[in-house]
Image: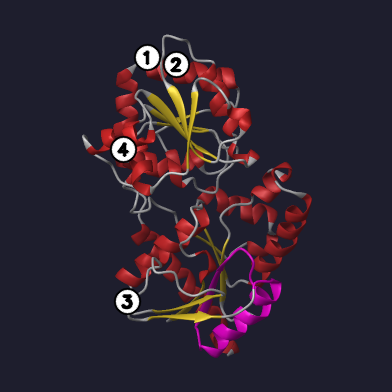
């Protein structure tokens, strides 16, 4: 097959969407070299983007809706692509279009979005689902939500789980100690990823740690973007960190806190698992599905309940060790190899559905 990819999110940003795109195309290149990949972007190819002998990179100038709705699908047709794969918005002009919809948080929690973004998503995503021959999503929970909120998606959705990105891996002593030193971090500590987005519910992690008894010396290390609301003697923001630094933090943390209100998958959960870090997560979206029996899944979003559960775990090392072992085993069940196979299935089915039309 000749597979056209909207490459604007491949590499370059530390988001779940870019991690998904980068890991997927890297696996397709390495494990399925029989297929051609045609990358379309409005920028030149970054050096770090996965690329192979059967790949081409096409630059299409422009950066507005016209690019996605007209330029991209027409360029894919001109390149004789068998299928066009995008994330979210898909043009009705696409031949054998496949779109990835990671989650339906814009239906689940409209308060998490600006009015403009909410209108745009609720208009464009159902249209994309209608235009698509196949829809890829990253969990069974997301599949159920997509089919619930977007009737046009029924019968089209293929589940392809995410997995740990290869650049996150356990760091062994003494290297991890030297990395903690350069970050100014001292053990013991808890870990969470910082963001201003209300859906990620960062304030819950902070409130829960602030409620811990003084007998527990753990601070909360917050990576990424932290707000002034998080100021506390028990909270230590470290800003944006490198992949190696994040791996070291996972490898040393007593517990990873994932208080998000909703996730289509939750890649940081499997990143923590891979590094042997015990996980406590919320119940929103696919987090219980991804966690399985390998994390402490909280049915409550009460700070007091989280404080009590954290205290219990920190005071019982055997429970933390058990979660760590379960997490290491659970992480191995998610692979980009299997994800790539499910994507190829979606591509093949999309092509079969329109073979007679072209």
Instruction: Answer with the quarter of the image where residue 181 lies.
Output: top left
- For residue 311, the mark is 2
Q: Secondary structure at mark 4?
A: helix
- For residue 179, the mark is 4
Start-end of magenta stretch: 63-92
Mark 3 or mark 1, which has the lower sequence index?
3
Q: Secondary structure at mark 3?
A: loop
Contact between marks 4 and 2 (CB within 8 A): the answer is: no
Of badges 3 and 4, the one in the foreground is 4
Contact between marks 3 and 4 (CB within 8 A): the answer is: no
Q: Position of residue 26 (x, y in %)?
A: 37, 66
Residue 233 is left or right of residue 152, and the answer is left
Q: Tell me the distance, in whole angstroms, between the alpha carbons under discs 4 and 2.
A: 27 Å
Q: Tell me the distance, in whole angstroms, between the alpha carbons under discs 3 and 2.
A: 50 Å
Contact between marks 2 and 1 (CB within 8 A): the answer is: yes
Mark 3 or mark 2, which has the lower sequence index?
3
Mark 4 or mark 2, which has the lower sequence index?
4
Q: Position of residue 150 (x, y in %)?
A: 68, 58
Q: Position of residue 303 (x, y in %)?
A: 58, 21
Q: Secondary structure at mark 2?
A: helix
Instruction: Answer with the quarter of the image where residue 355 lies.
Output: bottom right
Q: Tell me the distance, in whole angstroms, between the alpha carbons under discs 2 and 1.
A: 6 Å
In front of the other: 159 or 108? 108
**Residue 100 visible in the snapshot:** yes
Q: Which residue is mark 3?
A: 33
* Residue depicted at x 55% and y 19%: 305
């Amino acid at each position: 097959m000749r597979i056209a990819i909207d490459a604007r999110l491949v590499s370059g940003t530390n988001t779940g969407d870019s991690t998904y795109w980068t890991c997927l195309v890297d696996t397709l290149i390495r494990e399925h070299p029989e297929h051609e990949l045609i990358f379309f972007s409005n920028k030149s190819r970054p050096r770090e983007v996965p690329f192979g002998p059967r790949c081409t990179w096409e630059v299409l100038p422009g950066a507005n809706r016209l690019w996605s709705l007209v330029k991209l699908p027409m360029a894919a047709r001109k390149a004789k692509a068998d299928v066009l794969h995008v994330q979210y918005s898909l043009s009705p002009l696409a031949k054998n279009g496949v779109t990835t919809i990671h989650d339906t948080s814009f239906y689940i929690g409209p308060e998490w979005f600006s009015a403009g973004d909410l209108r745009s998503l609720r208009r464009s995503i159902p249209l994309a689902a209608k235009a698509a021959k196949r829809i890829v999503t990253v969990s069974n929970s997301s599949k159920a939500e997509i089919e619930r909120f977007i009737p046009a998606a029924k019968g089209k959705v293929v589940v392809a789980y995410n997995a740990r990105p290869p650049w996150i891996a356990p760091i062994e002593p003494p290297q991890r100690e030297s990395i903690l030193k350069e970050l100014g971090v001292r053990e013991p500590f808890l870990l969470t990823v910082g963001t201003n987005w209300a859906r990620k519910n960062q304030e819950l992690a902070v409130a829960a740690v602030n409620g811990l008894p003084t007998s527990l010396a753990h601070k909360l290390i917050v990576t990424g973007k932290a707000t002034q609301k998080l100021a506390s003697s028990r909270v230590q923001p470290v800003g944006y960190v490198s992949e190696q630094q994040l791996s070291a933090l996972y490898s040393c943390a007593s517990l990873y806190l994932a208080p998000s209100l909703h996730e289509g998958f939750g890649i940081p959960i499997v990143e923590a698992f891979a590094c042997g870090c015990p996980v406590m997560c919320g119940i929103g979206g696919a987090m219980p599905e991804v966690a399985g029996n390998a994390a402490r899944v909280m049915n409550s979003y009460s700070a007091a309940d989280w404080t009590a559960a954290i205290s219990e775990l920190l005071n019982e090392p055997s429970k933390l060790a058990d979660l760590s072992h379960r997490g290491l085993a659970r992480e191995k069940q998610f692979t980009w190899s299997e994800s790539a196979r499910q994507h190829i299935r979606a591509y093949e089915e999309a092509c079969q559905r329109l073979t007679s039309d072209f």
